[in-house]
Amino acid sequence: MNEFFYITTPIYYVNAQPHLGHVYTTVVADVLARYNKLKGSKVFFLTGTDEHGDKIMETATKMGTIPDKLADENSARFRALWPEISVENDRFIRTTEPDHKKTVQAILQKVYDSGDIYFGEYGGHYCVGCERFFTETEIVDGKCPIHETDLIFRQEQNYFFRMEKYRPWLIEHIQNNPGFIRPERYKNEVLGMLREPLDDLCISRPKKRLSWGIELPFDREYVCYVWFDALINYLTGIGYPDSENFKDFWNAAQHLVGKDILKPHAVYWPTMLKATGVEPYRHLNVHGFWNIDSSKMSKSLGNVVDPLDLKEKYGIEAFRYFLVREMVFGLDSNFSEEALVERYNADLANDLGNLVSRSTKMVSKYFDSTLPEPGEDLKEEEKELRALALRVVGEYRDRMDTLEMHTAMASVWSLVSGLNKYIDYTAPWNLAKDDPARLALVMYHVMEGLRYVAEMIFPVMPATSKAILDILGVQQESHFKDLERFGKLRPGTKIASARALFPRVEKIVKTQEAPVEAPQDNLLDISDFAKVEIRVGRIVEAARVDKSDKLLVLQVDVGRKIQIAAGIAQSYSVEELVGKNIAVVTNLKPAKLMGIASEGMLLATDTAEGRLSLVTFDRAPKVGSKIR
Ligand code: MSP
């Protein structure tokens, strides 16, 4: 058993607001942190924000602000979100913090002094979204394989890290340490990348092009390239090189990332560590992506899921459960609110919620809310139930250890349904009539079984776990040693009556709208339609309007700059609008809304949830071109 457990999430870029994807990774990290606490390990959990680089600079410029301000605002959003969703990280790191700058510079100097950083010239295809160059074999149809956007050809003099030098070492390390990159499919993907020589890693940007970064200690004309800067957060976060935390936790380090950032974590990072003279991390845990209703989640498709909306509707416990139960770790998964509602009603309201409420009601009714003495007269059913509880603990631990969290949950639910079946089979309502001794034995077993469930759901649903343990009168913190023996609950304990833990929610039925009838009259001649000029507009700036919760004022480039006042503030935030390409009617007579001049109208429609959805494009259009 590991005595220490160090878990990290990617540090998130501050050019966007937190969404479902960020929440998934961070919730899983929290689940693993809490699970390791159950095992009795000392845990350190690090998350934070990645604040330097082209991408942040570009977004700040687009929004008419400065990168420091953008970083402060969006970093604060991430930081504030985590407690809202029961994530308990030990440190929130920002790459703009002074200790991080110091660590990055110390490592740069060390690697430079050892001769693994050199000055040279490089040209290649760069994606600003990924903040990295792509090799010819990685490029798909001339575009970034992740963002599907055009790449920029960049050539300049820069500093390079001798990454290729460490390729043979890395291959050997991966082969000798089977769980180093997991699941297996990603390990194989990385070994595939390492079959060909690697380009050395460009680790600088000339300040004259990009000043938003950490200065190289050996050349003040350059700043550090964002991945080299960002990855080092995992060392800064636990006080590399001298702190006790670093000494205790580093060799228990596990990173958790999405598949989009596999290469930086599986290739750049271990080779950087090797060159720095630091042991590689223990595991890189790679998960798949959430798609929304079967398509990629993206700002331009307008299908980005806001986690707080879901929290508000279903509660954070159910949302966390869904994320963990629904995704097979390592594979992509489809997110839909309908699936969430189904899981909620089936697993939480029906199976678990009912179990808790009906069983505690029985203890209240038959034993005046006091846990009875079980006696010794076990029948086959009790023996089976005990064996099931102990087997589930074993399965749960094996599966959690190998990151099969969805089957770990399924295993716990096999105990929930075992308990429900046990109640149905033993029928306490009949025993109440003529067999009080057996009734006591049965109710004790149900309550004790419930304790097993409550302890095991702690990592995923900490508040529900606590609520059930409170009902059972268990005060001490959860720990696996309390699950080694069935029968720890003390007879005589007061059992509280449960409130409904998960009230059922309405099933979402995709409403069958009445078919749209073909118009019969009011038909337009094509020449009438041609009078309407609709053009592609790019939103350059967006701002809220004082005293209006509906109106936004947009500056839009439609080939010329126009201002539009639009009633979309309840459906879109200012940040997500800037940079969007939309459809704009450009030959309307100017109007005024709440005193604001408006020179055009944007096109939008309704979503099934009653929000607005802007008309956008499935390929990057030319700004200002006519829509016909
Ligand atoms: N800043 C870099 C990471 C540097 S780590 C040293 C970065 N940031 S990011 O904001 O783009 O976050 C990417 C991560 O967000 C993914 O690796 C994944 O953890 C999470 N997700 C973003 N979208 C996602 C989905 N649609 N589905 C699941 N997780 C995804 O990359």
Image (cartoon, rainbow, N blue to C red):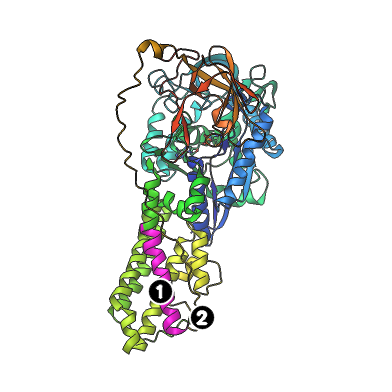
Closer to the camera, 102 or 571?
Answer: 571
Residue holding disc 1: 359
From the image, give the main secondary structure of the stretch colored magenta.
helix
Question: Which residues lie in the magenta part?
Answer: 346-368
Residue holding disc 2: 493
Residue 212 visible in the snapshot:
yes
Instruction: Tell me where residue 193 sits by quadrant.
Output: top left
Whether 146 is among the magenta residues is no
Closer to the camera, 33 or 254?
Answer: 33
Q: Distance between the residues labelled 2 and 1?
A: 15 Å
Whether 353 is among the magenta residues is yes
Q: How crowded is mark 1: few (under 14 residues within 10 Å), some or many (20 or more)?
A: many
Q: Which amino acid, by three-letter code, is at mark 1?
A: Ser
Measuring 33% from the left and 81% from the top, which residue is drawn there?
Answer: 429
Measuring 54% from the left and 39% from the top, which residue is drawn there?
Answer: 18
User: Percent x, y for residue 516?
Assistant: 31, 32
Ranked by sequence position, the earlier of labels 2 and 1 is: 1
Which circle, 2 or 1, is nearer the viewer?
A: 1
Q: Does 380 sit left or right of 278 as displayed?
A: left
Q: Does 89 sit left or right of 143 as displayed?
A: right
Secondary structure category for the residue under label 2? loop
Q: Which amino acid, by three-letter code, is at mark 2?
A: Thr
